[in-house]
Image (cartoon, helix red, strand yellow):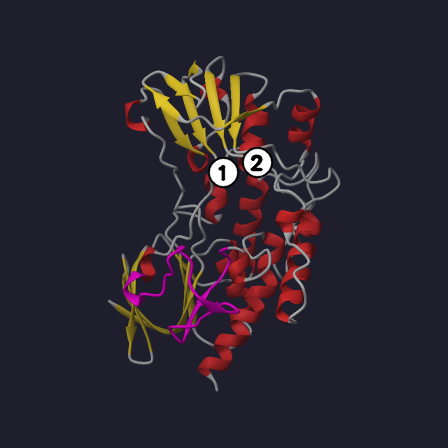
Amino acid sequence: MDHHVDVAVVGAGQAGLAAGYYLRRTGLSFVLLDDQETAGGAWRHTWPSLRLFSPAEYSSLPGRPMPSTAGGNPGAAQVIDYLADYEARYDLPVRRPVRVRAVHREGDGFRLETTAGQWHARAVVSATGTWSQPFWPTVPGQRDFRGAQVHSARYGGPDPYRGRRVVVVGGANSGAQIAAELAGSADLTWCLNGAPHWLPDDVDGRELFRVATARAQALAAGLPDPGGVASLGNIVVVPPVKRARDAGLLRPAPMFARFTPTGIAWADGREQEVDAVIWCTGFRPALRHLRPLHVREDDGTVSTRGTASTKVPGLYLLGYGDWTGPGSATLIGVGPTAKETVAALTAHLRP
């Protein structure tokens, strides 16, 4: 069955919902195609203890403040509830589970091949995020290692690792948070390249968004680069991480050089027996559905002006990181770029 809309949004996580909020105001026909069974986007797949970097009032999508939560910053369960409520409150036209297999050019618009038939749209907003594309480094001997390996995308909490010898790889937020959670119950080794770069203890998501925005504005104005979030550090010291760090439980070790069948080995020849390795090594943009458009660069991103593809008119990319807007992969940061995206596509469709 074929369907026709002005705008097709691929993904109904936080970025897709923010786009839907602004599309509601345009009078354009649109649909959000989401491959998940229920609302919540990537937040449905985080580990249970994950906490946001900011309080609820600084973690909201446009139009609807996130309700405050007791006991600190909101966790994943509160975010899922918030996104489900947001979707229902604004009566956003989400279709799920619908997987978009491929997006093709069709005249001046697009044809989307999906698990629910073909959709024809004049413009496409890709908002699929990165969660479904975890990055796994390659280390010598990896295939011969007989222990467990899991990416942070599939980490479900500390229970399976209690009393076991566990290596956490990665020096950013997921690595620090998971290492902190395991430090009291597992025999932990935290491997990273170099020393951990802690942000000042009072810095949270509000400051990160401010710094990212200030950098983008300076560069756009041709001013010297003031330095972005990376210049501050790359680990937000949320309370569980602070407690583990201050208790001396987060002792970083150098990245190991190779696997052995039963563990890991460093370049100096030292070996260690290991039961499990948890890879906290980040994600790549989930853009396989755009392959027919041939828009990806060598680094996996897409060349954009704002959020508009520079190669394919009518294609927009929202929520993948700073290359699609300052802080656009965050709840606090996606709203402004969603607003700009909808303004741009409206001008494109109604010149």
Which part of the image, by quadrant, shows the N terminus? bottom left
Q: Position of residue 87 (x, y in %)?
A: 52, 57
Distance, label 2 to label 1, CA atoms, is 7 Å
Front-most of 293 and 141?
Answer: 141
Q: Quadrant of residue 264?
A: top left
Q: Is residue 188 above or below residue 129?
A: above
Q: Is residue 203 above or below residue 124?
A: above
Name the residue at 41% across, 21% down: 276
Q: Quadrant of residue 294?
A: bottom left
Is residue 328 a member of the stretch shown in magenta? no
SS class, disc 2: loop
> From this viewpoint, which residue is outermost toward the front?
268
User: Which amino acid is tagged 1?
Assistant: Thr
| Residue to which mark 2 is pinned | 50
| Drawn side of residue 101 relative to residue 211, left or right | left
> From this viewpoint, which residue is outermost toward the left?
1
Name the residue at 58% across, 32% down: 177
| Drawn side of residue 141 relative to residue 92, left or right | left
- The chief SS type of the magenta part is loop
Q: Position of residue 330 (x, y in %)?
A: 57, 52
Name the residue at 47% across, 49% down: 41
Would you say residue 88 is visible in this rendering? no
| Residue to which mark 1 is pinned | 46
Q: CB of mark 2 within 8 Å of CB of mark 1?
A: yes
Q: Position of residue 195 (x, y in %)?
A: 60, 32
* Mark 2 residue crowding within 10 angstroms, few (<14) / some (14–19) / many (20+): many
Is residue 316 a member of the stretch shown in magenta? yes
Q: Is residue 240 above or below residue 248?
A: below
- Please give the range of residues in magenta: 291-320
